[in-house]
Image (cartoon, rainbow, N blue to C red):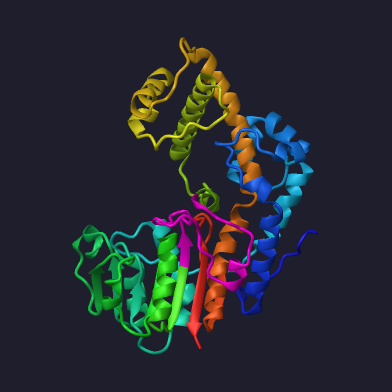
Amino acid sequence: MLPRPLETEPLSGAAIADRLRALDAWLSEHAPLWEPRPFVTWRPAWWDDAPDLASWVQTVGDGPIQALEDDLSSTVGLPERLASLARQAAALTELAPLAGAQPTPRGRGVKSRKGEQVGGFLAATEHALRGGDAVVVEWCAGRGHLGRTLSERLEREALLLERDPSLCAPARGAPERSGVRHVCVDVLDDAVHHALPDRGAFVALHACGRLTDRMLDVALAHGASAIAAAPCCAHRLFGALRYAPRSAIGRASALSLDANALRLSVLDEASVSPRDRARRQREHWLRVAVDLLAREATGADEHFSFPSAAAEQIDLPLVEFVDWVRRAHGLPVPAGWDPDQVGPAATQQLRVIRAGAIVRRVARRPLELWLALDRAQSLVEAGLEVSVGTFCARTATPRNILIVGRAT
């Protein structure tokens, strides 16, 4: 059944739990389509269960694939089964903005997209942060653009927490404003507790993966007056094997999300430059060629994995790239292989992989929102007043979901 669009206002209260349950049911039902990784599993089991989709994946051309990679919001050109799933995903992930468009903050070292993110974050959180004198605590602050902007706007002290010593200073040597303090500390270390005030207002703009969860735990332990988090890079688990659901609904879910599954939630190229996209496509083509050679040499239908390649390797001709992988990572290579045959075969296989990735990508935003709502619902369960919505346009950052909680 196609869910209707749910909210014209940001999600809050019982609506958070309701949407989380709906997303959980949808993701669980369609897990066979999105759990297999197209680069690793070239013939997933769902090909037998959905022959119409399998046929489309194997025959669709490069043009439609490129158009769908650029914008999956249009269902033109999709087989009906996939178009229906895309419409369901769009309805389930509809989110209202937490605030209207705001001026972009300008200042030293603030790039335009970063400025748009900071401006949107400020507008979306100001209602929760206004009142009182709670210290603003920016988690994984980097240069601290967000914390400084909030400090100035709210006329509050700000504590900027950052692990990298080279970033623990005002951008480009600008003098630090009064009441702002940068502290170099690893937020995963227990030493972070010693730096924190009680009842601070904790904010995090794109703290990677488990770093966001760490902030929520620490903020609650210190009796935070407010919490605002825009999660990012869910697959960054920092040693953990799987995502640990935070809410009662999440813990009851059948979903089991390791780093490979979580990586799906960040596969959005809305803000990737054409040059970077072209380089990524070349690396993918080279990796598929390597996989073809490894499968031929071993006779096993298994993915050959090796670490990311540097730019100088990606620019190598196919023969030299294969030789580099053979020497550096032990690639088994068939005797007398012909690059004039392997290259075109890799192009064909990559097209099928990209089409399969479009099928999988239908679940990208539902998974991202599931993760955000699991965190938001855990704050509801902790007694906070919580809202979830977007804080900026997708072109400023595809990671535009914001959780805002306020102690009652």
Quarter-wise, where is residue 79 in the image? top right
Residue at x-position 41% and y-position 82%: 224
User: Compared to 83, does 221 lie above or below?
Assistant: below
Residue at x-position 51% and y-position 71%: 403
User: Compared to 84, does 333 lie above or below?
Assistant: above
Res. 312 in view = yes
Residue at x-position 47% and y-position 34%: 278
Say how many tags the image has.
0
Residue 364 vs residue 391, the one in the foreground: 364
Per the picture, the main secondary structure of the magenta-coloured stretch is loop
Over which residues does the magenta segment extend?
230-259
Residue 173 vs residue 296, the one in the foreground: 296
| Magenta stretch: includes residue 300 | no
| In this rendering, position of residue 94 left or right of residue 321 | right
Quarter-wise, where is residue 327 in the image? top left
The residue lying furthest to the right in this view is 1
x then y, percent, for residue 233: 46, 55
| In this rendering, position of residue 181 left or right of residue 406 | left
| Magenta stretch: includes residue 246 | yes
Q: Work out which quarter of the rendered image holds the N terminus and state it.
A: bottom right
x then y, percent, for residue 104: 42, 65
Residue at x-position 63% and y-position 42%: 358
User: Compared to 363, does 385 lie above or below?
Assistant: below
Res. 103 in view = no
User: Compared to 174, does 31 lie above or below?
Assistant: above
x then y, percent, for residue 112: 40, 57
